[in-house]
Image (spheres, grey):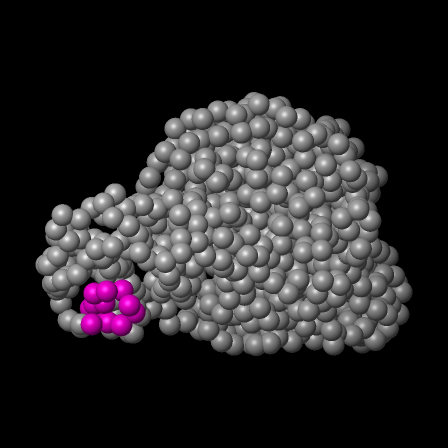
Amino acid sequence: MIPSERRASGVNQNSEFTSGVERFNSSGDVSDNGEASRITSSAGTVSQAMYRIPLGGGQPGVVSVDANLLSGAGYYVGIADYGAGRWQWHGPFSDNHLRFATAQQGPYTSELGNMFISVLVYGGGSADVVGVGSSLVNPADAAAPTAPSGVIATALDSGLLLSWDAVAAPDLAGYRIYSSGQNFINGNSAGVVHSRVLEGLTTHELPLKPGTAIHVRISAVDVSGNESALSEIVSATALAGTAPELKLDLEKPSAFLNEPVSLLASGAVSYDFDLDGDAVFEISGDTSGAAVVDTSQLGIIRPRVRGWGADGSAVALGGVSLVISGNSRPVAVAKASPASGTAPLDVEFDGSESTDFDGSIVGGGWDFDGDGIYDVWDDAAVTHVSAAGNVYSAAASYNAKLRVVDDNGAWDVDTLAISVAAAELPNQAPTADLQADVTSGEAPLTVSFDASGSADSDGTIVEYAWDWDGDGIYDGFTDDPGASHTFTTAGSPSVKLRVEDDRGARSTDTLTITVNVAGNSLPLAVLSVDQDRPLTGQTVTLDASSSSDPDGSIVNYEWDFNGDGVWDASGSTPTVLHAYSSQAGYAAVVRVTDDLGAQALATIQLAATNTAWSSFGSDNLNSHRSPYAGPGTNHLSWNYASGDAIEFGSPAIGADGVIYFGSDDDKLYAINADGSFRWSYLCAGDVIAAPAIGADGTVYFPSQGSRLYALNPDGTLRWKITVNCGSVVIGADGTLYLGSVDKNLRAYNPDGTAKWSYLTGGLILNTPAIGTDGTIYIGTTDHKLYAVMPDGTLNWDFTAGNEITSSPGIGPDGTIYFGALDNKLYAVNPDGTAKWTYTSGGAVYSSPAIGADGKVYFGSFDSKIYSLLPDGSFNWQYIVGADVQSSPAIDTNGNVYVGSSDHKLYALNPAGSLLWSYTTGAVIGSSPAIGANQTVYFGSQDGSLYAVGP
């Protein structure tokens, strides 16, 4: 950061100046030297400092470089030319101040609006880079400055001394000197040459061979590239003597206001000193060669020295550059924990011990990977300085940088080495695949089983275990994939295969074998529930009374409440009561047995939730379905105005009816059911994702400041961690699952400690869904839907036609539905195979909602809301006034509620007809949530949370 008093000191009063220490990148031996960068090379090596100059998309008309050559033949300047696609290198130079005319060349500005300049030394050369400057072209300026006048050429030993009158132009870039061995009028004539850089002063020493006669004209050039007519011509002949070899030694390239800085000159007989660079030599005829620079003005100054030989005709000009500042630098102190480990490495950074001895630190931030781009930054707050975090996904050594800025604009950088080692690739679990030559028949039934379709992607399968009756006890073990078994009694055993790989990972597959006795017809199992979306702890009635046996009677009912293969209850009664204690999706199973031992199975899907609407998709299946009725009219109960837009996500509803939602004003809000304010929590960035509510009322949510928060129900902080992620879904055991923009699907324990991560191939911009078997489904921008096991290993992935930002939802039969930016809604079987696709007229950002009857509802960028049948065929569509990013919500009556960018929330009946709509003040990208009080809650980009109903 450059203080304001130095911003206009690069070329003219309208130019920008960046001090040499503020380099974007460097290579070789480069170090800080006050406000300058010292670049040093040795024999056979190169060192350079690179600078990034933000130009806001404009083009530079003139570029300046201030550098004091310390040793070697000279330094080189490179300017990145985006027109030619290469660097333009100039040099070598020994002058302390250079000006390059760039107005009608290039372009020199990148797509991001930046210009890049590099200063280089090699082979033993060294220099202090004091700063670089630039002035922007004014495209509307076509007026050239006036021509220079009063040009005088004075013959010197081995050269000429040129002087002229200054041209009065506020946008003057400098002067261009044309010369030739013969008289000329046009600067483009044959034999006429001009200087590589512009002269910034009104004097210039032109070195020549003794006896050389030269003709000279001078023009004035402004920052927009307009050039004046040439001046009158002057000529002179260089004298036979030798010019002094003037050498200047500056004590330091930067200093404080009125701080003494010595300047030593050698190589001449006497010296004239211009101590502040104003072209007035305050000291003449000095023979000591020592002077003290005038540091009474802030900014960059360029003192000049004129060295004289014994006869007065031997003259040499030289100059130095230095920056004068009004306060001391702050001291940046960077700390990191941990500073090393295996990828992915979650690092917390702390710069709170940074100090400023004569003021205060007012801003700053962190460059996590040392690429010169500060990943978190604030000019006017120390939020990022005090605490920041980053997750390093790739193994490498990183030079993380903390930069702090004080109240006068001075700054300092501290660098930390972060060492990230490659983590051992996690073992991929094998895939079990069980097939049989027959799956039904009369006892005794001999069945040949084949597990050869089982595979292990990163190893080998070393054991096959066989459980013939599904009781959880493995009856046989083999090292080959084939086995046979004879079933002697009637029933429907679930034969289970377990495969184990060479690193101990296991996977299972089951196959039901139906065994009957001769002459007996199989029973029919039918299962229903009184509530398939219960709250945790709520009693559910599972009812198999519609089951039947065509030639006998059912004598036993067995119940597996969670589909884990273990029979939790049994008896002769066709109904049973059960309460689910954890939020999850469940596959409840009944097995009926008839009077001759024949059996049949029936399964039904349930989803228990902690609250009426506890997360983005209401439940872990992301069905967006509520057990409660929504509002029948568009009556506004209340609205609450936050401090900024409410963009995406969904409100969550607590067990006590409190509504939680986030806003772009960096806050999470808790609003009572009557619309009154309860509390808010200020975060490190916008809160655009939906919160999730745990079993104990803990509220989990992310912010754009790369933080995941856990708040107590009273709004106090329980914990926070650093991760740039989306909404959370909570597993049955309390595990938090979320996707992050570093491409990882992550699992955290309820206390915020990391459990595992799985690296996908793209950014994750949606919310995971969890199947009834615990499989986690997530889509990414690499066009893939991933199915990840509860231990963090990959089960399968499915490739769509474009990026997936829509969250997946799981249907009653386990089908996974999601939208993609190729305009399609996809249906994928639980084994990862394609089921069907439906093409809409626009990109599908909206996450699908799944009804109790398996119908699928979603919105599209073609301004339509769609309803599809479970087989993928069209049911109905409803046209709205703009695109639909919001995800639908379904009430217990099958009514559908969804928002649109036309500012409206729509309520549609199961047939697709409009019940009502409600108009807000801006786009509705938020997805609605349905409460237990017949109220639908949703946010709008007008900043308000709305409660419509009852």
Residue 470 in magenta? yes
Query: Could you tell me residue 321's position as x and y percent?
Result: 74, 62
Residue 779 in magenta? no
Name the foreground residue: 55 vs 67: 55
Q: Quadrant of residue 704?
A: bottom right
Number of marks? 0
Inspect this view and state whether residue 148 appears. no
Name the foreground residue: 484 vs 940: 484
Relative horizontal placement of residue 80, taking residue 380 as reference (left or right): left
Q: Quadrant of residue 648?
A: top right
Locate the C terminus by quadrant.
top right
Q: Where is 278 relative to 44, above or below?
A: above
Query: Could you tell me residue 305's position as x and y percent?
Result: 77, 63
**Which region of the structure is painted magenta?**
459-475
Residue for point 56% across, 72% down: 753
Residue for point 14% across, 62% down: 488
Query: Could you tell me residue 26's position as x and y percent?
Result: 56, 64
Query: Could you tell me residue 222's position as x and y percent?
Result: 73, 38
Inspect this view and state whether residue 498 appears. yes
Name the foreground residue: 598 vs 535: 598
Residue for point 50% across, 34% down: 857
Relative horizontal placement of residue 225, taking residue 538 as reference (left or right): right
Locate the N terminus by quadrant.
bottom right
Residue for point 87% across, 61% down: 297
Q: Where is 503 relative to 276, above or below?
A: below
Relative horizontal placement of residue 157, taking residue 562 as reference (left or right): right
